[in-house]
Amino acid sequence: MLRKRIIPCLDVRGGRLVKGINFESLRDCGDPVDAAERYAAQGADEIVWLNISAGEEDWRGLLEAVERAAVRVDVPLCIGGGVSSVDQARDLLNAGADKVSSNSAPLDRPELIGELADRFGSQCVVIAIDAAADGDGSWGAFASAGRRPTGRDAVAWAAEAADRGAGELLVTSIDTDGTLGGYDIELLRRICRAVGVPVIASGGAGGPRDLASALQAGAQAALAASIFHDGVHTIAEVKQEVARCGLPTRM
Amino acid sequence: MTSRVTLIDHGAGNLRSLRAAFERLGADVEVTADADRVAGAERVVLPGVGAAAPAMRTLSRTGMADALREAPSLLGVCLGMQLLFERSAEGDVACLGLLPGTVERIGWAERLPHMGWNDVVATGASPLSPALPAVCYFAHSYAVAPGDAAVVAAETDIDGRTVPSAVASGRVAGVQFHPEKSGPAGRRMLEAWLAA
């Protein structure tokens, strides 16, 4: 039986692991390859690196780190953040990424999704959707790290992205992100119903119970950052909770 | 004795992880797109990310397709396993024809791609048997439909129907999952193939 996946997300800048609040006062936290290898050994089903700066120098540092990760990390690695062209995706995949995730660029030019899928296969193409509730029971899709509204309905955009060739959707609620108060379950339910591709839940995990709830709501994977990085919870604790809820997990 | 592994570069995707996985096992890995190098190789690995049609075009154009048909030991991974069969519905393209059967879309699945970790259960003896059962990482939307059930070495359940997840016949073997991304379980799989 296909297992529900637990995915730690690491912020990477210039090939270094960073932590910070609101992208300000970033602190260097070491080598992201070490962290990815550690999480893989602890049972992470996949690793996501979010590149939080797209400068030229940072990009080269990222590629170099991906190359080192490919040699040492034996679970899938997805790289996102600032990917806006087929060439950039190619560079990441050649460096050793298994999937690339893109958020803003396809909102501005949806054809990019089909171009990526045709060239590399849908299984390599993750479309990240940052959504915020608009107060009347729907959600808007945002670009540029949640700062720029696009006027698109997030659920409709999810369906369009899947139709255009996305192999997976990484759905982040801007409202719950960073709150540790749990994922936006209703948003996940709506998007899981609207698409026939796997959905990764993101934004708001405060503990094992939250990840399990997102998976119960229909998501195939749950992503979290701070609860793992701050040492509050281990991957194993989350998986025990997922198993306790009767969901299939890889122990 | 150090194993030599020849890894086929047909121009799509991540070869680095597969190369590293074999190197971690002490193998000496050569990556090539040169048919002459493939023709002299002992152990050949046909990787696969991307689509069947462009991969077959590259293999045919370079002459590697003919060299692969003569390889003394061949392992296809993911798309590479699908290419071992006669024909793929993905792009309706003729493949290597080393194993009887076709490649079909997993039309009944609740969600595609079939993405994530799933059980690999042995159905018969094969070079991979010592490493089974296992839970391995998959990422694919097509699966093989062998013309001869005897080539199926392991199966995996996708939403209530099984698909072949490992095949083996004589000098040819294939896995639908990614052993290089399947942690210790995948490592044991590659180790078993190298030892066979």
Image (cartoon, rainbow, N blue to C red):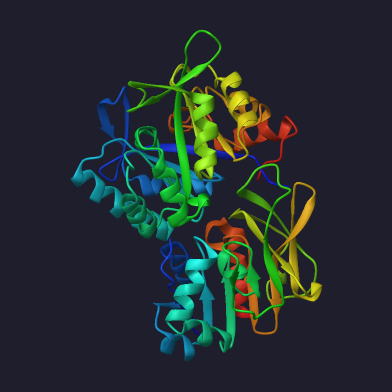
Q: Is residue B151 above or below residue A243?
A: below
Name the image quarter holding the C terminus of chain A. Answer: top right
Q: x, y percentage for residue A93?
A: 39, 55
Q: Residue at x 59, y 84 (%)?
A: B73
Q: Quadrant of residue A96?
A: bottom left
**Residue at x 35%, y 38% (from the top left corner):** A81
Identify the residue at the far top of this view. A135
- Could you tell whether A59 is left or right of B174 in the image? left
Residue A122 at what x, y percent from top left?
A: 51, 50
Q: Position of residue B15 (x, y in %)?
A: 43, 65
- Look at the image and tell me whether residue A28 can be seen: yes
- In the image: residue A169, left or right of residue A248: left
Q: Observer-nearest residue: B71 or A245?
A: B71
Quick check: B158 left or right of A96?
Answer: right
Q: Horizontal and vertical percent for residue A40?
A: 51, 48
Q: Quadrant of residue B19?
A: bottom left
Residue shown at 48%/38% (left/top)?
A8
Q: Residue at x 31, y 26 (%)?
A: A20
